[in-house]
Amino acid sequence: MKITGGIPLKGTIKTQGAKNAALPVMAVALLLRGETLTLDNVPDLYDIHSMMEILQTLGVDVEYKHDGKNSQAIFRVPDELKWEVPESLARKMRASSLMLGPLLANCGRVSLPLPGGCSIGARPIDLHLKGLKQMGAEIDIKDGVVHARVKGRLRGRRIYLDFPSVGATENLMMAASLASGETIIENIAREPEIDNLAATLRCIGVTVELEGVGGVRIKGIDKAHSGRDKVIPDRIEACTYILAGVMTNGHIKVEDVVPSHIDAILAKMEEARAKFTVKKNVVEIFPAKRLHPVTIKTMPYPGFPTDSQPQMAAALSLAAGVSTIEESVFQARFLYAQELNRMGANIQISRDVAIIRGVENLHGAAVKATDLRAGAALIIAGLAAKGETRVEDMIHVWRGYEAIDKKLTDLGAKVELM
Ligand code: UD1
């Protein structure tokens, strides 16, 4: 993407359906037999299409409609699903691990090549496997492929997650939906995407009760029925545009936001003295003076999301003072810093902390999107920078941002795909 920077953004855009909510609720289709799952607000993204491709190879008939405003995906599931996930598709994205729980629960077995995804540090799936084993699965890993089986049904029980992993929570919730008896999972992730998954499971007949701060109780059923649900708005996409508005000193409205989902980011923006208002589901950004420096630590929800960390670092690279961001969820999530520094930022990495010394201006440069959110950070930095920025390896960005070129053009930015 070629970006001619320095233009304050102006206008209104609407948030897409959440990638990270859509992927698990699409995997819910694998809990069905001879039934249909209909999902509204499914975003048009590379990762979503990879997920659809995997579902198709497992035997699901997929219909996807997107008219530029509304979108819907219909998954017609046969009586018998295949249970071997092809290697080329599994390695395309980490969310392919979400096949494990539902396929094992529905078919009694699954083969899944260890998943790929963003290069943001080691991303094991040990917690997923531990929980499935506790529910009665036998699991071997041979030549990078996970082979899991269960005699009869998975068995509901109490599971404690050593860390509130989003993917492990989702996998085990889906597995528990067809298990015998009741499953209680403790120390679960409480990201909004988990509520979306709970709602989708309910729409196919599963009883799911999210309890207190960190638990969920699920009563397994023998057979799931057809259902329809919708995908929540993408909080990370919304915040990327919000921060683009802040960075360019623009005046923009981002619609279809659930403000409570982005409390941590809004709190830090307020602390940094960005000017904005929140009305119902609209966040409006106004031109303001330079941001004040802030201290941030990423944490599981409701803490500051790791997926907004690179974009926030980009915004703080123009603050009047020294900010720090500690990354506590993933290792090696600072690959973007070197690229931002090429644009004149002054970011120094010390183990899991980024020390960001604010500069007055950024300048255009040729940079590489090292992963999805790094790419987003470089794009918003390019919008604020003087001169021309070329962001290479946009393939990462298309995994998570629907029509980003069009949305930015609608906001008055000068961007071009090459
Ligand atoms: C999901 C999101 C991703 C987001 C992340 C944290 C999707 C498709 N992706 O990823 O965008 O950045 O949540 O909010 O929803 N871990 C283990 N063992 C496990 C599982 C996880 O050690 O079995 C570690 C990971 O390596 C990582 C941390 O736990 O350091 C968080 O991972 P997790 O919450 O599982 O993230 P994902 O579900 O992969």
Image: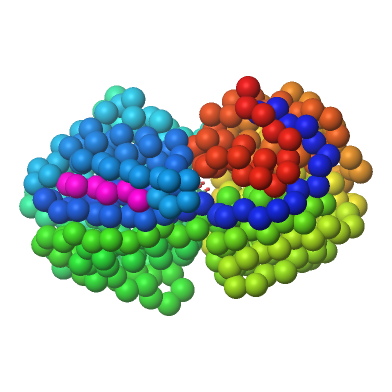
> What's the residue at 72%, 56% (across, down)?
252
x, y percent for residue 346 = 84, 38
Q: Dividing the image into 4 quarters, which one contains the C terminus?
A: top right
Above or below residue 319? Residue 192 is below
Quarter of the rendering containing residue 180:
bottom left
x, y percent for residue 388 = 79, 28
Identity of the residue furthest to the front in this view: 67
Q: Is residue 75 magenta?
A: yes
> What's the residue at 37%, 35% (across, down)?
50
> What's the residue at 32%, 39% (across, down)?
52
x, y percent for residue 347 = 80, 39
Q: Is residue 136 magenta?
A: no
x, y percent for residue 405 = 62, 37
In the image, taking residue 42 as reference, residue 156 lies left or right, namely: left
Boundaries of the magenta span: 72-77
Task: Inspect this view and state whether residue 136 appears.
Answer: no
Q: Nearer the viewer, residue 291 or 185?
A: 291
> What's the residue at 8%, 52% (across, down)?
152
In the image, taking residue 308 as reference, residue 181 lies left or right, namely: left
Quarter of the rendering containing residue 368:
top right
* Most common secondary structure along the magenta stretch: strand
Quarter of the rendering containing residue 258:
bottom right
Task: Inspect this view and state whether residue 384 appears.
Answer: yes
Q: Dividing the image into 4 quarters, which one contains the N terminus?
A: top right
Q: Nearer the viewer, residue 50 or 162?
A: 50
